[in-house]
Image (cartoon, rainbow, N blue to C red):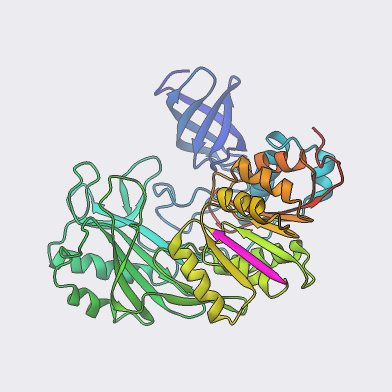
Amino acid sequence: MKKNQTVEVTIEDIGINGEGIGKYDGYPLFIKDAIVGDRIEALITKASKNYGYARLSRIITPSPDRVEARCRQARTCGGCQLQELSYDRQLFFKEKKVRDSLRRIGGFDEAVLDRVFEPIMGMDDPWNYRNKAQVPVGYDRSGKLVAGFFAGRTHQIIPMEGCVINMPGSDAVINKVLNYMQANRITAYDETSGKGTVRHILLRYGFFSGQWMVCLVINDPSGEKLRNSDQLIESLREIPGMTSISFSPNTRNTNVIMGETYKTIWGEPCIHDTIGDLEYEISPLSFYQVNPKQTKVLYETALAYAGLTGNETVWDLYCGIGTISLFLARNAARVYGVEVVPQAIEDAKRNAALNRIENTEFICGRAEEVLPARFAETGERADVIVVDPPRKGCDEVLLETITRMAPDRVVYVSCDSATLARDLKYLAANGYRLEKVRPCDQFSHTAHVEVVVMLSRTEGESGTSL
C-alpha cells in the first residue's frame, strides 16, 4: 500500500478512538468518519508495514446504522467521533470496547465477563449535556479572531457554532468575549511564538442552578493585558445567570490548559450545582464531571456497589472536590478523601460543610503516597476503597497498598477501559474477585466511555481466568 492510493473497502469494526476499520487485501486501514457497514472509497494518508490510515473520500453504500449528523462541523471538529452512528450502536460499541479491553488486556475469559457484565447506562436525551467547555482562541486563515475546537489531529481551530453537545447558550457567551477582544485589540495566544494574550475561554454552567462561570486563561501573570475589563463584565452580565467572571494566568509553554491560580474580577469565585440532593461549589480549577445527569447515575451505581450499611470506613482516592466522597458519607461511618490538588481539597472541605456532612476527612497528597504512609503509620484498615483515577489509571504501589489493606470491596470508577483492565488484572491476581462491571455513557457521541466496577476480597482465590 502507498500514500495517496485510492481504495474501496467495507468497514468491519470500530477502533478504540471511534475510527472505522476496513481491510484492503487483508491490510487494515483506520478511517475517520467511517462506520461499521459502510462501503467506501478512501484515500490512504499514511502507510506502515502492518496497517495504514486513510481519509474518507466517498460513501459508496452507507451502513444501515449511519445517521445524519446534527452538527454541520461534525467531520472537521475533533470533539465528536461517533455522531454519524446511531445512538443504540454507539452504546453497543462502548460496551464492546470495555468488554474487549477486559478480555484482551485484563485476561478475563468470556465466562467471567458473562457473569459480571451489566448493560451500559445510556442517556434518554444524549444532546447538549456538557456543563463545561475549554475553548481555544486563535485566528482563522483570513486573520479573523475565532474560538472553537481543534480539528482532528491538528491545531486548526474550528469555530464553535451551535455545538450539539455543549450546554445551550454557549455561543452567546463566547461571542461576547470575542467581541470584547476585538473592540479592545486584545490578541489571541500563538503557541509557536509564545506571544498573544488569551489562550482559552473556560465556560461552566450549572444545569440545576442556572449559574454561569467564565474564566479567561491568559498569557499574562497580572491580568493587565485585559484592557477595559469593565466592558467585558458589563457585556457578560447581560447573560441570565452569570455568576462568576475570572482569569487564570498560564504563561507556560505547555498543553496544560488552566493555570495554577485564578482571580475573580466580578461576582463569586464559584458557582453552585447539585448532583442528586447534594450541593457542590465549583471553582474554575475544580474537577467536576461534565455530564451532570449521567454523573448522578454513575455515582448512584458506585454507591450501590460499595454496599454500605452505615458502619464502614471508606477511602475515596482521587476524590477531587469530594463529589463521590459525599455520596458515600451519608451511608458510611467515616470517609477519607485523598486528592493531590490543594484547591480541590479546600473545595471538598467546603462542600462537606455546605451539605452539613461531618464524617469526612480530606487529605492533600498523591494517593500512591498518602495511603501507604497512613497504612504504615497506623495499620488501620478500610472496609471499602473507591478509586476514580485519571486516564493513566492507578500506580502499582497504590494497588499493592490496597491489597495489603485488604478492604472487603473495591469500587473502581474509570474513564479509560485499557488502564482499568490492566489494574483489574493486578487486583484479580492478588486476592480480589471481579463481581460487577457496568459502563456508563458519560460522553455521548464521542469514543469515550466511563465504567464502574466492583471487586470483592477472596481468601486466596484468584478472581480471573487467565
The count of marks equals 0
Q: Quadrant of the rendered structure where residue 263 is?
A: bottom left
Which of the pair 389/361 is nearer the observer? 361
Q: In this view, does 239 lie above or below 4?
A: below
Residue 286: x and y in percent read 45, 64
Residue 28 shows in this picture: yes
In the image, taking residue 18 as reference, residue 54 lies left or right, namely left
| Closer to us: 113 or 34 | 113
Residue 152 within the segment the image draws in magenta? no
- Range drawn in magenta: 333-338
- Does the magenta segment cover residue 335? yes
| Lateral position of residue 209 relative to residue 309, left or right | left
Q: Quadrant of the C terminus?
A: top right
Q: Viewed as shown, does residue 276 lie left or right of 345?
A: right
Q: Where is residue 260 in the image (x, y as percent from the top left)?
A: 35, 58
Say whether residue 130 is left or right of residue 172. Answer: right
Q: Residue 294: horizontal and vertical position, in percent?
A: 61, 65
Prevailing secondary structure class for the magenta stretch in the rendered image: strand
Q: In which quarter of the image is residue 306?
A: bottom right
Question: Against 205, is 365 above or below?
Answer: above
What residue is rendered at 53% in x and 58% in y?
339
Residue under the point 33% across and 57% down = 259
Q: Residue at x 55, y 69 (%)?
A: 292
Q: Which residue is drawn at 73% across and 51% down?
A: 405
Q: For residue 448, say whether it is visible.
A: no
Residue 183 at what x, y percent from top left?
Answer: 13, 68
Residue sitting at the far front: 377
